[in-house]
Amino acid sequence: GIGVIWSVPTALMTAELSTTFAENGGYTLWVRMAWGDFMGEMAGWLQFVSSAVDAAIYPGLFLEYVMQTFGVDFSPVVAWSIQGGFIAVVAALNFAGIEQVGHGSLLFMMLLLTPFVLVTLIAFTGVFTGTGIMGWEFKSSNLLGTVEDPDWPAFMMVLLWNMGYWEGASVCAGEITNVSEVFPRAIAIVFFIVVANYALPMLAFAGLDGNWAAYDNGYYIDITRNVGGPVFAGMLGCAQCFSVAGLFTNGVVKNAYQICGMGEQGMLPSVVAQRVGLTRAPWLALLITFTVTCAMIPLGSFQNILSVDMHLYCLALLLEMASLIRLRYTEPDLDRPYRIPAEGIWLWLLFIPAAIVSVFAIFWGSVTAHFFSLGLLIFGSLLIWGLQFLRKSNPEWFQGVEGVEVFQSKASPQRDVSA
């Protein structure tokens, strides 16, 4: 319910604005066009830090899934080595270029989905009889179970985290051929896969194990081991590892191509848009992304990281939704290859529920997360003012990249950016 209310408008927004602003940089271009340079760069800062914090979750999750899959505990040296190797493999894939990232992500998705589809289908064969074809006990009554004293803020944070980040793909729109046709279709397909991949396994595993209070990261692996044995548990554990690899890769791509796009647009020094000659990977943007992400890893627990992550992300998302609505009024003649089929009050009604959910998510976090997020907001504002000073004193550093269409608000000072 809430996840769909929140994610459907975000996915539609991404389809409309990514095809309208078909260059790298994504949401930073939308917000800049609607509200000017400062807010565009603030959207970039919020999304960059949010994604860096988010990506910092995955090396630890990968290690946790490996330990649960094989039922072992590692020494600190081995644990850090596994996480370091995981980061190195994802880094190598990204430096190989966006096309290889796409192939790798597709492979990760297939390796993730196959065990989940198999386990889900086997479990559902017991819906009517109570026992599946493999002898697994399935209790439909478990689906109506409840949890005593549920932690609603934590639940909402995890739900929104799982159903968000649709606009992340927009940052590499400039890498896509025929984006006006490919992007909306791809988002529609992925939306269906995401919803099905969350909803159906949840129902299947709930029927197999009704101990809701025990559900935590990796508990699907424990359930599968209990009902199906070590082989099925191993398959599902490997699927979880591939899932984490895909999510980490997505976070890296999102930040790296956002930085690269901002460099191409003259929002950041043009040097960050430099690319490797053979693979066309933005090497400096990738290096910055991996450095910042690795620095975020020691932040602490999953919940602490997630709370800060969602604070920053929801602030950026509110800016993006406001930008779509504002641009409908201030730039009515923009070429929109895909346009959300809603106008006026109906467009507002589509986005108001998602905006309300975002506001609640911001205020539901811990006090520590609020102060940490506030500190990052203040630091980001100082950083943007510093960039504005550098842009005035050294305009040659912000000349952009030849051949890139530049998007600027009419209210922004028009800069001499190569196009």
Image (tube, rainbow, N blue to C red):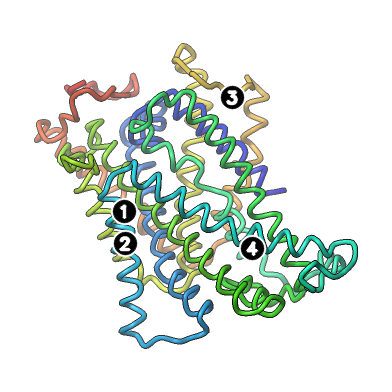
Q: Residues within 10 Å of mark 1 (few under 14, many from 20)?
A: some
Q: Residue at x 24, y 23 (%)?
A: 413
Q: In the rendered structure, which disc, 1 or 3, sits on the residue that comes first in sequence?
A: 1
Mark 4 to mark 1 CA distance (whole Å): 33 Å
User: Could you tell me the amino acid type at mark 3?
Assistant: Ile
Dot in front, 1 or 3: 1
The residue labelled by disc 4 is 155
Q: Measuring 39% from the left and 35% from the top, which residue is drawn there?
A: 26
What whole-number distance in Å separates the C-alpha atoms at marks 3 and 4? 30 Å
Q: Give the residue pinned by disc 3.
A: 340
Find residue 40 and name its label: none
Do callouts 3 and 4 mark residues in contact (Cβ within 8 Å)? no
Q: Nearer the viewer, mark 4 or mark 1?
A: 1
Please determine whether, in this image, residue 412 is positioned above or below residue 133: above
What kind of residue is marked 1? Leu
Residue that label 1 marks = 93
Gap between marks 4 and 2 measured at Cα: 32 Å
| Residue tagged 2 | 89
Q: Are marks 1 and 2 in contact (CB under 8 Å)?
A: yes
